[in-house]
Image: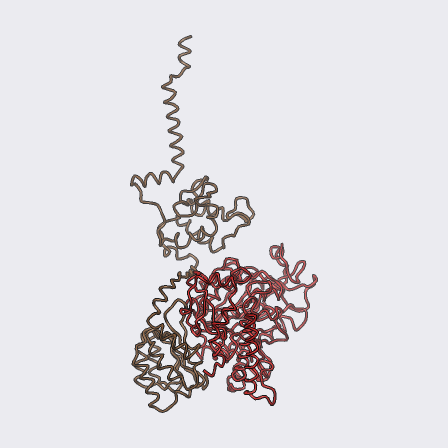
Amino acid sequence: MDAEEKQGVVSVGQYFTAVGILTLILIATWISSQPAIIQTVKEALGLRPYLQAEDDSFYQQRVHDIMARYCIACHTDDKSKGGLRLDSFRQAWFGGKSGSVLSNGEQAILLQRMLLPVDDKLAMPPYGRDRHTDEELAIVTLWLKKGASHSLKEEDFPEAPEKAPVIHFAPIDWAQINNDRQTFAGQVSDFQHRYPFSLNYQSRTTTALIFKAQLVEKGEVATAFESLCGMSPVLAEVYLNNEYGSEWQGDTDFHKHYQTAFTSRQWPELRVLDIRHWQISPALSAFLVSLPKLQRVTFRQGYVGSELIASLEQKGVRVTLIDKEGI
Amino acid sequence: MSKFPFLHLATQAKDTQRIDLTRRNFLTGSGATVGGAMMGGAALASIISKSAMAGGTQLDFTRPMNSPLAPLPPQYPARAKRVIYLHMAGAPSQLELFDFKPELKKYDGKTAPESFLKGKRFAFISGKPKLLAPLYDFKQHGQSGAWISDRLPHLAKHADDLCFIKSMQTDQFNHAPAQILMHTGNAVSGNPSLGAWTTYGLGTFNQNLPGYVSLISGSRSPDGGKQLWGSGFLPSVYQGVKCRSDGDPVLYLSNPDGVSRNARRKVLDAIADINMQTHGALGDPETLTRISQYEMAYRMQVEANDAFDIKKESQATLAMYGAQPGKKSYANNCLVARRLAERGVRFIQLFDYDWDHHGTNQNDSLSHGFVNKCKSIDQSTAALLSDLKRTGLLDDTLVVWGGEFGRTPMQENRGGQDNQFAGRDHHPHAFTTWMAGAGVKGGYTLGETDELGYSVVKDPVEMQDFHATFLYLLGFDHLQFTYRFQGLDHKLTGLKKAKILGKILA
């Protein structure tokens, strides 16, 4: 009887060993299903590099925005429904309660949920939320198909839909702009007082200036132009056309005087120039070709030689020829 | 300075400013710097300003009191300096002009699929409408290979200048609200129009002409009414001036017989004195608007008649546009638009009525009335583009063409019976608009509709996206371009999240 009883009783030591082993097995099983822990431990031991998407990767450039737009309202660090976070490649790779959401290419859970009909209970994003477009779906599909990589670049996905350029407004540092404008601020404001509306900054955030002769009084354009030349380093666009074009059509000396005023200055920022009332002298031609940033220039037909037009166009300058009198 | 007879008022600006500042203005502005030195154009009179430096986001639009339309620089360097907006009121059929759907031919006369009808509302379609094949032939044009129908042979030559958006969407399916939405960013009345925002933000170069001109052709004014070029809650000086393209451009602009320009000047000075007294007592900025409008009318007496006088154009130019002086037509308006653009008008808005082709009678059918309508705009629109290109203006002019919504792939069946003539109902889910000129890619197409042209399948463009892009081209961040009214910082794009259409930008 004693022997029988002894056979059925497990010693304390044996019991704890068994429970211990079982616990270890359970923990091991649980850990093996926790890629986040494995990854973190391995990283800590230096066995693996830190897992994250590279800045120029296809994920970071194309996929991440889609996640950010549609998923992270519910899948991020402070709210991770289904244990899933999609706020970075690293977190997405760790997966959620259903395991990995990125593996199995096109069968990946991430994609399968996105493909469900809008009103399906499991559909993602859930019913009532903004839904991804076909193009966005195509991007995610491509990425998963090629193994949900954190390192493949955009050029590895030539078949991906064309990327919309992202418009980014730089924050404005008003103090800096004010500072940059200091050099010519006095001249600019004097000029604006004398010839209202004709001189303006190209934008609120730039130092460059635009001059339009259209609103300068008759008889004052040439004088205005002379004092304008004082600001030549910051002038980006100069439109000398106005209704009183004849003002420029004085005798040759007159013409020479203003063309000299123009050519004796540096115009490093000049991009657009309208001199349709000027007869172009050879000296001026050479000067125009030498302007470093010139993009567009307007002449009156007949006032300009074809060689100048050709050499300007060769430089990539757009030449407009006006063939009539008037503004 | 005699060209700006009102400049002497600049010295008074400081005093009037005191009155215009309410207690709230004063308190919010007191932390701000004095002087609008950074604001380029506003250097005429140093006045207390809610400086952009103080608020961080609030841009400063203060101008000298006597020149509310003084030019101001845009926020960022802009591609477009002026806008010519060609609105085809009534909504032209994209399926007969630009959105080529060969597949629709196969289904001609077949009942529309259930998915087209379930849960959808139409202006007139009821029951089970039939699909209607495109009525006209399409061909590819230009290097870009854009599909354009044979109704627009002249415009087709400009295929490589046009930037199509085939995925426009709106949420209004009746003309007036849809037009108001398109032009003001909100289907409800009371908001400033695109041109009002533009002239408020940028002013205008030519102080002798209105900064914002609205020209109308077709059998009547657009359904949305005057608010389509109104100023909404912006000061009324920024509203469009509706001008006529024949006779006096602005009614009652000429002096009556026996009244000399000198006498007119004296009268205006006397009225201005009285108005200034009123303004001194009450401080209502609308009084200043009134004074400046009188002054502008005076200056316009000289310049406007010239600007609007298309008789001054050569025969060749008139023929190119198909313009006939003295006639009220879209062609004349196009030519006037070019003349105004040359003279530094900031925003030129054309409305052309009669594009509502339902098919209830011959005149509003796609088979007849539509053909004539196309003829009436094709040559002149193309001429306008050529002319702007020739004069170099297209480099900094944004041209926009479009209606307020699209038209259904289905034949309209008013009251359950197919209409007598070929016609399509209003369709807000997909329509085509094109832009050309400053800052947009020529020969480019954004967006796509499904094979029957019913809904957008690629790059959907909501109205607020269109508006955000429009402001971007003019140099503004739509989130920062605001106007405070009734305690809210109002934006053209409203509260919905808007995206700038990066793909169409050159």
Question: For the view shown, which residue lies furthest in the top direction?
Answer: A1
B335 left or right, relative to B176 = left
Q: Which chain is red?
A: B
Residue at the spot 38% in from the left edge and 64% down from the top edge: A174
| Residue placed most toward the observer, B231 or A190 | A190
Q: Which chain is brown?
A: A
Residue at the spot 39% in from the left edge and 33% down from the top edge: A29
Colouring convention used in this rendered image of the protein: by chain
Task: Please indicate, yes or no, whether residue A287 appears anywhere in the rendered image.
Answer: yes
Residue at the spot 56% in from the left edge and 59% down from the top edge: B455
Question: For the view shown, which residue lies furthest in the bottom direction?
Answer: A251
| Residue placed most toward the observer, B233 or A114 | B233
Please identify the quadrant where the C terminus of chain B is shown. bottom left
| Residue placed most toward the observer, A122 or B58 | B58
Which percent across, then down, holds residue B243? Answer: 57, 78
Please identify the quadrant where the N terminus of chain B is shown. bottom left
| Residue placed most toward the observer, A89 or A293 | A293
Which percent across, then down, holds residue A87? Answer: 42, 48
Q: Is residue A93 above or below residue B300?
A: above
Which percent across, then down, holds residue B440? Answer: 45, 68
Q: Is residue B451 above or below residue B251?
A: above
Q: Is residue A138 above or below residue A253?
A: above
Q: Quadrant of residue A154?
A: bottom left
Count of residue discs: 0
Task: Please indicate, yes or no, whether residue B386 appears anywhere in the rendered image.
Answer: no
Which percent across, then down, holds residue A32? Answer: 38, 36
Q: Is residue B264 above or below residue B73?
A: below
